[in-house]
Amino acid sequence: MTRELGTLFILLALAGCDPSFGVIVTVPLPRPIAIACAESTFDSIAHPRRVNPINPQGPPVRGMAFVNGRPYEELEQHQYKDGTAALETSVWRWGPNGGRFSNLEANTVGRVLSATLTRVRDACGGSAVPGAPPYSVKRKPF
């Protein structure tokens, strides 16, 4: 049985099948924000510093924030031809045991990630796009 699963996995890999499942959250912006500010603010939320338990007087240890048991991916800012922009981040599961995110999980993760992106936007002088939804959530694969 193990040999058959290994063969199946190799065949799926060769066929280009990507066994990853993600929740991607996007927050629209009326214009781009300073990327250095966005990355620094995001890093302080997604990778919080904490006191080193072995050496409390030493430099802090870089932590990792988790959403639904999964670490944040990095922050991206997309800029569009019309001058608008969007902040985006995600969480992912890999492998056959990861499984697709349910609608409930995607919505829950979406709220948490959008709150993070909104904090980044606000801390860096950005604003919401009037009349646009505050954020969007996509699952991959769909």
Image (cartoon, rainbow, N blue to C red):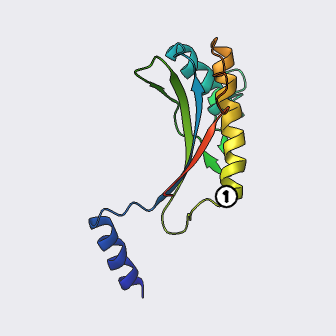
Name the quadrant of the N terminus: bottom left
Q: Which residue occupies 50% across, 20% down?
A: 84
Which x, y percent locates residue 109? 68, 47
User: How many numbered discs, if any?
Assistant: 1
Q: Circle 1 — which element?
A: helix
Residue drawn at the location 54% of the way across and 15% of the way down: 33
Residue 91 vertical placement versus 76 (above, below) = below
Q: Please tell me which residue is depicted at 44% across the width and 19% down the height of the picture.
A: 82
The x, y position of residue 105, in whole percent, is 69, 55
Mark 1: amino acid: Asn
In the image, what residue occupies the spot 66% across and 38% down? 113
Q: Nearer the viewer, residue 107 or 61?
A: 107
Q: Which residue in the structure is indicated by mark 1?
A: 103
Badge 1 local density, few (<14 within 10 Å), some, or many (20+)?
A: few
Quarter residue 4 falls in: bottom left
Residue 2 in sight from this viewpoint:
yes
- Is 136 placed left or right of 11 in the picture? right
When asked about the image quadrant of residue 16, the answer is bottom left
